[in-house]
Amino acid sequence: MIAWCLEHGISVIVADPRIDTESRDALERARDGHRRILALYPRIAERRIYFRRQDKSSRQSRHKASERIIGVERDRMICALLNKAANTKRAIVTLCDTDLSDDAMSLCRVLLENSVQLQWMLHDDWVSRVDTYSLFAAALSRRIANVSIEHFSGTDLDELARTTLADTAAAAAVDDVFSGKWMDWARFDDPARPGKIKIVKLRDMIEELDPKHVGMDTGHVAFAGAYLDGCHYVHSLPPSLLYILKDLENAATYELRERSRSERALYALQQSNFWTLMAIAAVNDRLGVGLDEEIQAILEFLKDLPQTSDGESP
């Protein structure tokens, strides 16, 4: 299901010069796509997919008899990621509805990362991937604990941090899987280099999921386009100022105020639709929800935005 969606629907997140980005018809169709995705939410609940019991983490390869066994809630972890995607989507739509589409673009990158990681985790060896992601929480907790001890010594945070660091089972697992580091959670044994670790980056995840749209020089179109476009807004790089600068072009004096813009609303809405739908498709595949036909129908709907009458750039 995921492979089909990526192969046939990637055009949804690619800017098309034939689409008038301020067309009311196009915007309304994107919003209709949003409503159709919202209508899927109760359909998932209707399927009554029950959570399975907690299991031992497959990444806790060594522990002493006196140490606790690290458990993982795989089903709840992946469903939590899907819920987070739904929340981020709602935030994007809210910003677009209030003419703050520039700011929505930052959240589009957040949603893209959420969706791609979820899709990739549920692809191939999903148990190992979800367990690694879950265990990374311990690596981050230990990092926060070290920061607390160094900067908040003698406070309640200091005591809580030392309790966290005293967990020898977590310490051993974090050291074994992440080498004590707290960056780049997707670390696995490299089958091509025995004894070495392979770190899987977001770009690698996208290209593994959809090798068809990978360019020779720039990589996958979603990474080279949608992801890097979102980075401009997350990091306040010059392209993120384009429409704000337009407002200032003819001004003789400066006035500090909120400047609402809607030019990127269509693109942000379409991205929020596509990446949320892909996240739903990933969970649908893994948990057997049975919404294949509905997901395919929505994707086909999203691809069919109205173009300008002459088919040329507006």
Image: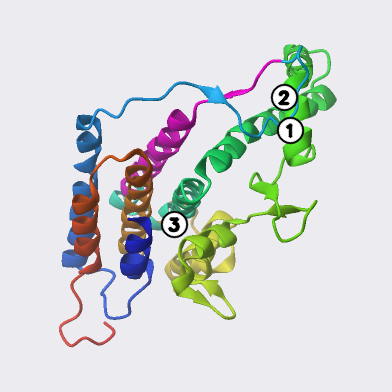
The residue that label 3 is drawn on is 105
- State the extent of the magenta-drawn residues as a range: 68-94
Total labels drawn: 3
Please name the amino acid that badge 2 sits on: Ala
On the picture, is 104 further left or further right than 166?
left
Give percent across and percent down for residue 164. Answer: 73, 18
Separation (CA) of disc 3 from disc 2: 37 Å
Task: Look at the image and tell me in which quarter the N terminus lies.
Answer: bottom left
* First along the sequence among labels 3 and 2: 3
Query: Relative to 93, does residue 147 appear above or below in the rendering?
Result: above
Q: Which numbered circle lies on residue 170?
A: 2
Q: Nearer the viewer, mark 3 or mark 2?
A: 2
Q: Residues within 10 Å of mark 2 (few under 14, many from 20)?
A: many
Q: Residue at x 71, y 31 (%)?
A: 61
Element under label 1?
A: helix
Q: Residue at x 53, y 70 (%)?
A: 224
Give percent across and percent down for residue 34. Answer: 24, 50
Please name the amino acid that badge 1 sits on: Val
On the picture, is 12 further left or further right than 163?
left
Give percent across and percent down for residue 154. Answer: 83, 13
Q: Residues within 10 Å of mark 1 (few under 14, many from 20)?
A: many
Does residue 249 appear in the picture of this structure?
A: no
Q: Quadrant of residue 43?
A: top left
Front residue of this view, candidates 125 and 266: 125
Q: Which numbered circle lies on residue 174?
A: 1
Element under label 2?
A: helix
Query: Relative to 149, does residue 41 appear above or below in the rendering?
Result: below
Q: Nearer the viewer, mark 3 or mark 1?
A: 1
Q: Is residue 299 magenta?
A: no
Asked whether disc 2 touches disc 1, contact meaning CB atoms under 8 Å apart, the reply is yes
Separation (CA) of disc 3 from disc 1: 34 Å
